[in-house]
Amino acid sequence: MTDTAQIPDSVHEQGEYNFAYLDEQTKRMIRRAILKGIAIPGYQVPFASREMPMPYGWGTGGVQVTAAILGKSDCLKMIDQGSDDTTNAVSLRGFFEKTAGVRTTCETAEATIIQTRHRIPEKTLREDQILVFQVPIPEPLRYLEPRETETRKMHALEDYGLMHVKLYEDIAKNGHIATTYAYPVKVNDRYVMDPSPTPKFDNPKIDRMAALQLYGAGREKRIYAIPPYTKVKSLDFEDYPFEIQQFDKPCGLCGAENVYLDEVILDDKGGRMFVCSDSDYCEERRADGHLGPMAADPAAARVGNTKTGETVR
Amino acid sequence: MTATQETQHSQAMTPLAAGFHDPVHDAQACFRAVMNAMARPGTRQSLDTAGLKPPAPLTPVAAALALTLFDYDTPVWLDKPLMTSEAVKAFLRFHTGAPIVSEPVEAAFALVANPGQMIPLASFNQGSAEYPDRSATVILLGQDFAAAQTATPAVTLTGPGIQDSTTFPVGPVPPVFWEQVTANSRQFPRGIDLIFAGTAGIAALPRSTRILPTEV
């Protein structure tokens, strides 16, 4: 008889991982950081980020936050640049299917927890939903001041003049505020926060959102949060007010207007189309019979099935 | 065996109250209740204590919070009724491993079994301007959320997590408690966070919540 044969079957039935991969002490540590994050909206709480079985930049911060809050009755949705079927979303969804065995979905309305990389779903989120962001660089002042000791002091003193200088320089050079993603916001009139590299198109959705927002940065070891209905203001000037991107055409597939669009290259002769970045929203609209101007195009039909669009920046 | 020896023997053999039946999922459910309470200040979140029978004066809800949030990283301060109970200290030490401290300012969490006699909130760690997250979380036991039964009038809350404003009936709390809470929220981002533990539910009051003056 081999050694493995002596292990009772009940051990194997328990599975290989603790529920949602992380050990319980790690979950407690992350949970305490989340509670402090919620109590101080927009403040980046340091936490002992663990090494995860995926590389940094793959969403290790978001994964740790999700693992800490996830329960067996939750329904999880994973999106990457708005899409449910891109590499990052597929592999992280598989990670939680394997380690937690929770129900997963692509439908925004069905999910209780939505982990996202760089987009907020087009559909308005509800009070009973939680949005978890994967954040690469949580510190909005980092490119202006590389020293952590200094940026920490700037947050403590509410000294955000440098950020306004940066936005002013944008205007001086380009005639308008040229920051289009990771657009800095002020949370609850106190902390300046980086809403992760979401397009600034999504900034108005963060303001007074009904759902709780949690932000996790794994490599930088920070967690921060915005409670529901919290005032979140995008930084701007009186004479240069904050504006979101405008698209002159509707989605090529579903004809949706006032949504964020991805550019998809169709051939090497300059053919292109713009489609919804939120794949679930687009599919639902098409299922309801909405058709965009390019929905009948054979090239577009191929795109609609396997979307690989990169966000335009 | 003499009678004295017998008594000593039976004391030593008093079985330690059990922790969570299902440590992973019970702790997760409890945490979600705490998180929802913190994210929506003043709302009552129901909490199933799953048959916890901790030694008095520790209540089942407070025990669930302790099992969910405390471990060797979190020094815990206990008020007098809890501190004088060896059974409570043994329960917390065994199940959480949290060091029990005698100075309020050293604690990450505080458990208050007799809120009427609570020491001032200013005695706890308020965090620093650079690290406001290092402040204490104070858990008040034996709270009642039914408006009619509380001695103190309901306060009105506003701030992050609250759509417009909400009334928060809770008690018992010490006499000048709401003045202390107002002073606590005024020093934002520093300040302590409060969790109110009832019989089958909890509510929370993070430092970001502002107390509106009550209309008489």
Image (tube, coloured by chain):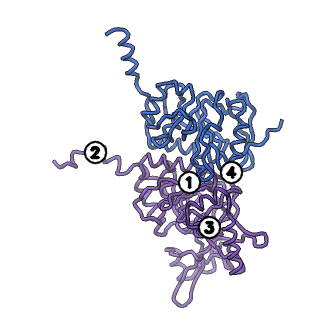
Chain colours: A purple, B blue
Q: Dot 3 corresponds to which residue? A: A288
Give the spatial CA distance, label 4 vs label 2.
Answer: 50 Å
In this rendering, the answer to whether A274 lies above or below A241 is: below
Residue that extends furthest to the right in the rendered view of this protein: B216
Q: Amino acid at mark 2?
A: Asp
Query: Where does label 1 land, which residue?
Result: A45
Secondary element under disc 1, as helix, strand or loop, is strand
Q: Which image quadrant is residue A138 in?
A: bottom right
How busy is the neighbourhood of tag 2: few (under 14 within 10 Å), some, or many (20 plus)?
few
Q: Which residue is mark 4?
A: B160
Are the residues tagged 4 and 2 within 8 Å (C-beta)? no
Is label 2 or label 3 in front?
Answer: 2
| Crowd class of label 3 (few under 14; some 14 to 19; many from 20; radius 10 Å) | few
> Which of the image's four quarters has the C terminus of chain B?
top right
Contact (Cβ within 8 Å) of mark 4 with mark 1:
no
Residue A163 relative to residue B8: left or right: right
Crowd around label 1: few <14 · some 14–19 · many ≥20 (10 Å): many
Q: Which kind of residue does numbered mark 1 sit on?
A: Val
Measured in 3D between alpha carbons, the distance from the residue under mark 4 to the one under mark 3, in whole angstroms, is 37 Å
Question: Reading the chain from its start, which is encountered first: label 3 or label 1?
Answer: 1
Marks 1 and 2, how far apart at CA: 42 Å
Residue A270 in picture, x, y percent from top left: 56, 89
Quadrant holding the N terminus of chain B: top left
Task: Give the amino acid type for the residue marked by disc 4 in the picture.
Answer: Pro
From this viewpoint, which residue is outermost toward the top?
A: B2
Cα–Cα gap, marks 3 and 1: 43 Å
Gap in angstroms between the C-alphas marked 2 and 3: 49 Å
Choose the circle earlier in sequence order: 2 or 3: 2
Nearer the camera: disc 4 or disc 1:
1
The label shown at residue A9 is: 2
